[in-house]
Amino acid sequence: MIYLSVAGIINVIFVAVGLGICSVSVIQVGSGMHIRKEAKGYLQVFFTMINIYLFMYLFRILLEGHPGNVIRVIIHIVTFTEMVVSGVMIYLFSILVLFVANPTEKVMKLVNRVLLVLVGLHVVSMIIDQFSNFFYSFDESNFFHREKGFLVSFIMHMLMLCQNVFLLIRYREKIDKKLLSALWLYILLPLAGIGLQIIWPDVQFFILASIIGAAYLYFIIISIQITRYHSQQIEKDRIDNELTMATRIQSETLPNIFPAFPDREDFNIHATMNPAKEVGGDFYDFFLLDDTHLGIVMADVSGKGIPAALFMMVSKILIQNIAMMGNSPEETLKFVNNQLCSNNPEDMFVTVWYGSLDLETGTLTAASAGHEYPYLKMPDGRFEMVKDRHGLVIGGMPGVNYKQYELYLEPGSKLFLYTDGVPEATNAEQELFGPERLLEALRGAEDKEPKDILTHVESSVKAFVKDAPQFDDLTMLCLEYHGPKVAK
């Protein structure tokens, strides 16, 4: 039989309401998609501790008045758990106050150590009390009685409470005003509950006040999290729109209409770029220097994303402008290098292959600033790697001299240029696509048009990589030289 007074019934109602509120809160936190992982974990532990405390208290008052040794052992365990959990609850709240106050790292570590020491002393004192009955005891009928040292059992709580008050006052300017009000309410409401218990000592107003304070604190934290999430979503949408625009602008700065020169029959050229991010650092370019010379550029900027894209734009414009002034490949790379080195605080660099093709003679004059080796197919041969001389990357050091070289393209020759995203494409087993597979892919489509060759190489890379994420830009260019005899 359960012995409950009117006050006991009221207490049971308070506890039942508290268990319901806290249980719903735990479920809501767990299903909250817009709550940060750290906040979600904290709130789940916090409300779980409150639930355990309430359940232990309810279990204790339901067991009171039932004699017997078994009941005595159970009620001692339940009460011990209740007292220990109360310490953990105030510790969790203190950690929250410490986190939102955000003092210096040194102060944060010191305060946290003090809190842990206090929790440890509280637990030890509760263990000792099981043999001394200094804090509380149970009579032969297993009714709970407060002993002369009962108030001493709350010393840890009071010390942590004083520390929380100090932090809230000291760092009030750094804490969100709504959250600050909720934290103060969580501190002051239980104190008001204690005041009411002085008038009605048998009714646990302290529990009711703590539940109301915790529920309001939960509401404020969740509302702040949701507001922050919506703000982040608005900012994310803005950035996404800007990235979409940047992608479109970047793609439009590269030659992307093919055939690029529909009135020219002395050559056929095609190029593609698939950035690893919304915008990339790779770029290609081709332009007529005059009626008989074609400039070809393939480059790869260090890094990815917006910074690389900006550096790419500057590099592309400089290379084309300097080349169009009639400078040779080695002169063009030297000038562009000095220009980029003069104002490069981020120490970015770009690898560049630039060649000038004489469309009448087939003579290709080129220079490389640390770029990948090109592949060349002569009309009566197969694709082969051309191990040209490499210079230092552009943007690495001012005053660098670059050496150019010449290749002779016969009618029917094909030139393939690319960035390192092609040979360095990686599959799930961390294997690289590599130059050997690239050469095999080129030879598998070497009799096709430039566009079809690029499509075949890209398909080969994708078949190798499969579902592994793309870590680098894939940029390729293929030129087929027809010779002057068919030029209009």
Image (cartoon, helix red, strand yellow):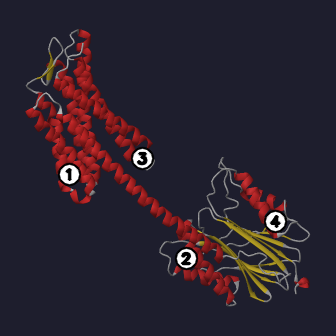
Q: How many marks?
A: 4
Percent x, y for residue 35? 41, 48
Q: Which mark is residue 37?
A: 3
Instruction: In this rendered view, identify the residue nearer to me: 10 or 39.
Output: 10
Q: Which mark is residue 167?
A: 1
Quarter of the figure with residue 425: bottom right
- Please report whichever mark, 3 or 2, sits nearer to the chain's N-terminal start: 3
Assign a secondary structure to mark 4. helix
For the residues labelled 4 and 3, the Cα–Cα distance comes to 48 Å
Assign a secondary structure to mark 2. loop
Name the amino acid, label 1.
Leu
Quarter of the figure with residue 348: bottom right
For the residues labelled 4 and 1, the Cα–Cα distance comes to 69 Å
Quarter of the figure with residue 413: bottom right
Q: Is residue 81 left or right of residue 368?
A: left
Instruction: In this rendered view, identify the residue nearer to me: 5 or 198.
Output: 5
- Please report whichever mark, 4 or 2, sits nearer to the chain's N-terminal start: 2
- Please report whichever mark, 1 or 2, sits nearer to the chain's N-terminal start: 1
Instruction: Please tell me whether mark 3 or mark 2 is closer to you in this view.
Output: 3
For the residues labelled 3 and 1, the Cα–Cα distance comes to 25 Å
- Please report whichever mark, 4 or 3, sits nearer to the chain's N-terminal start: 3
Instruction: Please tell me whether mark 3 or mark 1 is closer to you in this view.
Output: 3
- Residue that carries the numbered disc 2 in the rendered image: 397
Instruction: In this rendered view, identify the residue nearer to me: 225 or 215.
Output: 215
Name the amino acid, label 4.
Asp
Assign a secondary structure to mark 1. helix
Name the amino acid, label 2.
Met
